[in-house]
């Protein structure tokens, strides 16, 4: 699962594995200083997804919201290291919700940016190849899949995400929703994520979230989604 | 069969622009006429489906409907509480001095009204996702507590809501964007302290019973 996650691109890889380079140094010095997670660059300009998603939304979403998750994750992991050093198990357990929330926010947004693309770069259209086959095997045809996915998005009660995931045991794909910033981990591999937090659409669509759910299909990067299937 | 209960959108006790500059008219209009209305529509739809399921003795459908009822009824209840515990800044009731008895209790519990507000705001900013911050009174002990509820959960059994603050992004985003700290600060300028005091002195039935819109048309 992580292999798929980290393979998505250089930007995502460097963002999600910022610790890798300094890990060797930490081992060498035994001082346990870990690298920080960092905000990945977007693979397109802020305005590139218009009119589906406005440039202002993309800029705030990336520069402010995603950055806050990165900061929160770094702060929580730092506290966790201090708790580990003191062998304070209660403190480590107490930090898990923060790590899940901010770490999940970092992972989810990193995957989201990469599974979007401007139409001039191939965004929109329909899935092809193996991805098309697995979607049709679970949902009949692409249009039924889209309807189901939009129904799942609309049904989220509060903040959260809808994902097309692969079940690692059966290899089949399915639509699942996750609350808040819960990441797709464990039994499932994330393929396609759509952010249903209000900050993802409110400046442009306000309460008309169904219009956002309908417009997002014009900027889905199916090549990136297919890449995660492999 | 009895006529189906229908809940309706309560009028705001002030104009949509009356909480400016702390909450913009655009936010208030959308929040009241669109978001709150949607909870009511979906609640009424779910209750209609429930009536049908009950009449058919369809217990499985009744269970499936619980989630939609909880979410949408919660949204209706929470927003009804919220509108009434806000008031224009120019009103004398927007000052803590309009709640003398509550202030005594807040000082006893938190040290000062300012310390209570700081604590409350820290709790608001700690919410992970959509939800509400609440000042509640424990019914058994009478103690004041700051608590949160996720999404549209209402305050739990055993607690009486005194003050509710909506921390869904739709409550502030058009004006404050990702700066929710400024929203949390600004909202204190338009809290109806007199209303919060009334709830403090009232019974649980009194708090909910006086809310416009929670009485259906039966």
Image (tube, coloured by chain):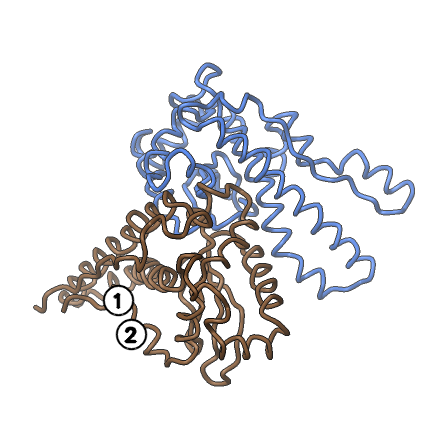
Chain colours: A blue, B brown
Chain letter for the residue marked with disc 2 in the picture:
B
Q: CA distance from mark 1 to mark 2?
A: 8 Å
Circle 1: element type:
loop
Residue that extends furthest to the right in the rendered view of this protein: A29
Residue that extends furthest to the left in the rendered view of this protein: B1
- Percent x, y for residue A2? 62, 38
Decide which of B32, A169 is in the foreground and name it: B32
Q: Badge 2 is on which residue?
A: B209
Res B13 → quadrant = bottom left
Chain letter for the residue marked with disc 1 in the picture:
B
Marks 1 & 2 on one chain: yes
Decide which of A36, B95 is in the foreground and name it: B95
Res A70 → quadrant = top right
Residues tagged 1 and 2 counted as in contact (Cβ below 8 A): yes
Binning the other alpha carbons within 10 Å of mark 2 as few (below 14), some (14 to 19) or many (20 upward) gives few
Residue occupying image coordinates x 45% and y 47%: B21
Residue occupying image coordinates x 58% and y 26%: A42
Residue that extends furthest to the bottom in the rendered view of this protein: B140
Instruction: Quarter of the image for the C terminus of chain B: give it.
Output: bottom left
Q: Is residue B24 left or right of residue B180?
A: left
Task: Count all numbered tags in the image, as a single digit.
Answer: 2
- Percent x, y for residue B108? 60, 79
Q: Is residue B51 above or below residue A211?
A: below
Q: Badge 1 is on which residue?
A: B214
Q: Is residue A212 above or below residue B166?
A: above
């Amino acid at each position: 699962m992580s292999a798929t996650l980290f393979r998505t691109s250089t930007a995502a890889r460097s963002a999600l594995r910022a610790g890798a380079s300094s890990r060797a140094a930490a081992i060498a010095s035994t001082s346990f200083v870990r690298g920080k997670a960092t905000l990945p660059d977007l693979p397109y300009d802020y305005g590139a997804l218009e009119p589906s998603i406005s440039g202002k939304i993309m800029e705030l979403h990336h520069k402010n919201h995603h950055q806050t998750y990165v900061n929160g994750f770094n702060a929580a992991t730092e506290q966790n290291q201090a708790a580990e050093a003191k062998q304070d198990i209660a403190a480590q357990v107490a930090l898990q919700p923060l790590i899940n929330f901010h770490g999940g926010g970092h992972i989810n947004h990193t995957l989201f940016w990469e599974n979007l693309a401007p139409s001039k770069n191939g965004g929109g259209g329909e899935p092809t190849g193996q991805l098309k086959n697995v979607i049709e095997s679970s949902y009949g045809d692409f249009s039924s899949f889209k309807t189901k996915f939009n129904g799942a998005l609309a049904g989220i009660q509060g903040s959260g995400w809808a994902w097309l995931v692969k079940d690692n045991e059966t290899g089949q794909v399915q639509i699942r929703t996750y609350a808040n910033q819960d990441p797709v981990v464990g039994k499932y591999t994330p393929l396609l994520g759509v952010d249903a937090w209000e900050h993802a659409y409110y400046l442009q669509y306000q309460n008309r979230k169904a219009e956002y759910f309908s417009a997002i299909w014009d900027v889905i990067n199916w090549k990136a989604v297919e890449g995660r299937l492999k | 069969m009895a006529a189906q209960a229908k809940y309706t959108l309560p009028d705001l006790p002030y104009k949509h622009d009356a909480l400016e500059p702390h909450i913009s008219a655009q936010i208030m209009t959308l929040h009241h006429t669109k978001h709150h209305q949607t909870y009511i529509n979906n609640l009424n739809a779910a209750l209609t489906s429930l009536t049908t399921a009950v009449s058919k003795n369809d217990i499985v459908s009744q269970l499936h409907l619980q989630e939609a009822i909880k979410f949408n009824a919660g949204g209706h209840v929470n927003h009804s509480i919220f509108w009434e515990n806000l008031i224009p800044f120019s009103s004398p009731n927007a000052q803590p001095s309009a709640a003398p008895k509550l202030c005594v209790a807040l000082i006893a519990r938190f040290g000062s009204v300012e310390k209570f507000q700081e604590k409350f705001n820290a709790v608001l900013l700690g919410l992970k996702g959509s939800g509400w911050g609440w000042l509640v009174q424990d019914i058994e002990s009478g103690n004041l507590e700051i608590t949160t509820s996720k999404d549209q959960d209402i305050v739990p059994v055993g607690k009486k809501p005194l003050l509710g603050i909506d921390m869904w992004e739709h409550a502030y985003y058009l004006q404050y964007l990702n700066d929710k700290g400024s929203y949390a600060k600004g909202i204190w300028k338009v809290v109806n302290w007199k209303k919060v005091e009334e709830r403090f002195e009232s019974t649980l039935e009194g708090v909910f019973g006086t809310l416009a819109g929670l009485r259906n048309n039966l």
